[in-house]
Amino acid sequence: MRKEARRTGNTKGDSWLNGALVMGVAALVSKGLGTLQKIPLQNMAGDRVFGIYHAVYPFYQLLLVVATAGVPVAVSLLVAERAARGDAEGANRLYRAGLLLMGAAGAAACAVVWNGADKLAVLTGDSGAAWAFRIVSLSLLVVPALSVVRGVAQGLGRLRLSAASQVAEQTVRVSVMLLLLAAGLNLGWSDERLAAGAMAGTFGGGACALALLAVWAGRQLRQRAGGGNAAGLTASSRTAAAARRRELLAEMRNIAAVAIPAALGAIAVPVAAAVDAFTVPRLLAAEGFDSAEAMSQFGVYSRGGTVVQLVVMVAGSASAALAPALAAARARGDGREAGHLASLAMRAAWWLGGAAALGIAMLAGPINRMLFADGNGTTLFALVGCTALAGALNAVCAALLQSLGAARVAAWLMVLAALLKGALNAALIPRLGIAGAAWAGIAALTAAA
């Protein structure tokens, strides 16, 4: 029996490791598509449009991470726990509560960004970014809900489906952006309109992935609950309706309790990028650049971050896929299995991040020219590339610490790192120019790691 249990445990571990590999490959493919998207954006539209894109997108990412980071993992953990004990109705109720919670959060965030777009654009140092903020805010109507559906797929062990949705989302996103970019260039759109068009793909991609997963998730949960919602069929009185509302609110609190620490722990890179978006162009303007020149310089600086994000996303996706297995091992007191999974994830982060940082630094010139058609900012590219190791470690540690119940430690370190990034930007950019932002990023993210 012990041998059989050991074989069963190993089989489960292998299954989750295979799932982590699938999620990592999907992240690599989807982020690769995102990287390819940015190449024609910069090549065809120029550094100012590229700069506006990179000033707006980190803010969107930050809002998205605050609203959704940890939600797929939280939902997957809770759904897996209930599915394991046969509570299909509880899993279905959790799904509905998650959609209500994330739908409301996304709508509120969309309204705030849409109405505050002009002020946000002024904060970036380029008032032309206002419509880019408005267009990207529409994505907040669909992507938070998508995070819930992905969590259900992962919780039911359908990691390949979750991975396929990532690839579909990015494919549609890139296609919409390229179509609008081509149309805009033919019609003679301004830089501001081209940047707004580039942002429109985020809504199209999110809507496509949500449609792909939502029908499947609803059907799966209804089938597991016996073909329908029994509580909904019999509860016709006000008392029963009030009880259902209380249950939904309780489920929302359950999701928030698990997801919020992870959200705080996962914001290091988006916060650092948002700090850059709101400080670097303004600090450059204070040194004598006009707003268009400052945004062009910011676009050159952002080239290296495109490649670093690829590394961080792959590392984070693979570790997130391991999170349910790690939490389950911890819950059943299997410290050996939990230690094995955590050790594997950390070793992978060191190898992937270290190799990426070294490779980007050594090959910065060829990569820069290959991707962006010229060698502008090659030194910056190499410096920003050095943050790949710290970014990979931060992404993996945030997921692991959440699974081990200690996410607040990483959260506070990363918040402090963001504050350090802003302070170092203010201190170094006046002395070193745009290179000061790169050195500030190395110091701040490494401190968090």
Image (cartoon, rainbow, N blue to C red):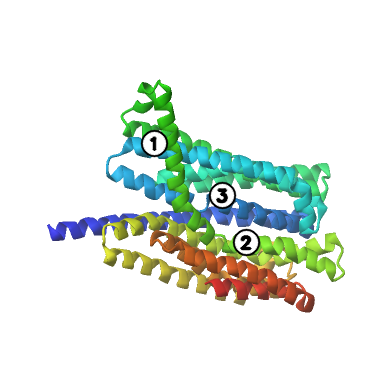
The residue tagged 2 is: 271
- The extreme front residue here reads 239
**Farthest residue in the left direction?**
1
Q: Position of residue 27 (x, y in %)?
A: 50, 55
Mark 3–mark 1 contact, CB under 8 Å?
Answer: no
Q: Of the residues shown, which amino acid type is indicated by label 2? A: Val
Res 364 seen here:
no
Q: Earlier in the sequence, mark 2 or mark 1?
A: 1
Give the residue number, with chain letter if any, for mark 1.
92
Quadrant of the image occupied by residue 419: bottom right
Q: Circle 1 sits in a helix, a strand or a loop, which is it?
A: helix
Residue 256 position (above or below residue 422)? above
**Number of marks:** 3
Q: Which amino acid does label 1 sit on?
A: Asn
Q: Name the residue under label 3.
A: 67
Three-letter amino acid code of the residue under disc 3: Ala
Q: Which mark is residue 64?
A: none
> Which picture quadrant has residue 49?
bottom right
329 sits to left or right of 251: left
Residue shown at the point (83%, 63%) measured from the top left: 293
Q: Position of residue 148 (x, y in %)?
A: 48, 43
Q: Residue at x 41, y 71 (%)?
A: 347
Q: CA–CA distance between discs 2 and 1?
A: 34 Å
Sequence order check, earlier mark of 3 and 1: 3
Comes first in the chain, label 3 or label 2: 3
State whether residue 343 appears in this view. yes
| Secondary structure beneath label 3 | helix
Tell me where residue 172 sits by quadrant.
top right
